[in-house]
Amino acid sequence: MWLTNLPHLALITALVCCDALGCGSERATKPNDVERDASYWMDKAQQQLAVRLMRSREAGGGDSRVARNVIMLMGDGLSITTLTAARILKGQHAGYSGEEAQLAVEQFPYSGLCKTYCTDSQTADSACAATACLTGIKTNYGTIGQSAQGVKVESILNWAQRADKATGIVTTTRLTDASPAAGYAHVQRRSQELDIARQLIEDAPGRHLDVILGGGLGKFASERSDGRDLLKQWRTANPDGCFARTLSELRDCGATNGSLLGVFSDNHMAYHLAASKGQPRLRDMTEAAIKRLEQEPQGYFVFIEGGRIDHGHHETRAGYALDEMLELDEAIEVALQLTNPNETLIVVTADHSHTLSMAGYANRGTAILGLDPSQRDLDGIPYSTLNYAIGKWQSLNKAGKRENPAPHLSKTSFTPSYIHAKGVHSGEDVAVFALGPQAHLFSGVMEQNLLAHLMAYAACMGHGATICDASP
């Protein structure tokens, strides 16, 4: 139930009562059954929004500003440990001990935590987690843009386009990877990337996107068996658009008023540490996207993802993951420089966490990708500051006993782990940071699907309550 026909204050009161007393027959139904329905998550989020608004008013706070623009920056797999370790690495790159450094998000006045579980999984993958962030509902592990019942749901990109806002997607992964796909695609399995590519070019909201920047060229042409050349289709549909394959071409597209499509690799874009000079960095794509979208009079919504943080963690190479986080950090700095905080809401978060830990009592200034030799196990063997619970390398000698990992540690090496297996996600909460109109609503602990509703509230779009309902 949406209750959107009620005046704003009555809506808040009604939803708070529902949240406190329960509405309909939910209490008599198994949670997993009701959670399969998209309306359960939509209603729940509106109730949670109403509670936040009520608390804000009771505290004498509030914010009357409307977000003309919304920028959502996602660090895929950006755990809180990754934030801490990347901060230290940033400081050490600058010649300091590192712990006292600051990431760009530390300028943000509001922060909170998101619960990332999915309808059928204690620990999320990017598909169900990004669907929560971008559509406002939770769904099954591996599912994109659909409820757990398999019913298609709209994303915040649909809502923004309906509000006459420009829209864009930027990622360092394939454009058809799970996180960006959650903004425009509807598939039961995230592996259906050829269909995801088709939906991006042929279906709404993908075909109406003003900016599309990322990797994964093969899904649009060479890997297809259906005869479609989706890039040619895009050019035909966007005769005034600009297509880029390199950083130089992306910069040349700066003068265009048409749509912008950049596909910079056949697969995922290369890690920054391994990339050629011809590949744009995330900060370059962020700058190009914002400058293009800023031309639109009604504002914009753009999703920007540092997607390869996650890949570094899956490989259990913390050096890659932390460097990709610092790439996201620079992109956030660019977003701050190019926007006005009085009219642009910027939200930074992660889809899920990873098993990286930072343990022991290393001395101040110890290289975050190395170890303090005074930190040893019960057998007297030194251990690294960063470790994974699960991963590929256990730092064992030929006899199967743990040995000093120091000779093998570098910015691109495997990081030691405890259990021998492929790197996996972890299920703890992830951080949320917000700055700009209605940023105060992004504090405390929240369900991950609430994020889409909070952004929609701030920008006066979508089907639920908005700040515009409260305006005289």
Image (cartoon, grey):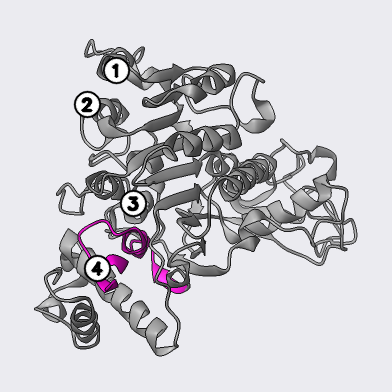
Check disc 1 and report the residue beneath it.
230
Callout 1 crowding tier (Cα within 10 Å): few <14, some 14–19, many ≥20: many
The answer to whether residue 62 is above or below residue 346 is: below
Residue at disc 2, secondary structure: helix
Is 150 displayed left or right of 460 in the figure? left
Query: Which is nearer the N-term, disc 1 or disc 4?
Result: 1
Residues at circles 1 and 2 in contact by the CB criterion of under 8 Å: yes
Tell me the number on the disc at residue 202.
Answer: 2
C-alpha distance separating marks 1 and 4: 37 Å
Residue topped by disc 3: 134
How packed mark 2 is, by other alpha carbons closer than 10 Å (few <14, some 14-19, many 20 or more), is: some
Cβ–Cβ under 8 Å for marks 3 and 2: no
- Tell me, yes or no, if residue 466 can be seen here: no
197 or 60, which lies in front? Answer: 60
Q: Residues within 10 Å of mark 4 (few under 14, many from 20)?
A: many
Amino acid type at mark 2: Glu
Q: What stretch is highlighted in magenta?
A: 444-472
The amino acid on which the numbered mark 3 sits, given as a three-letter code, is: Leu
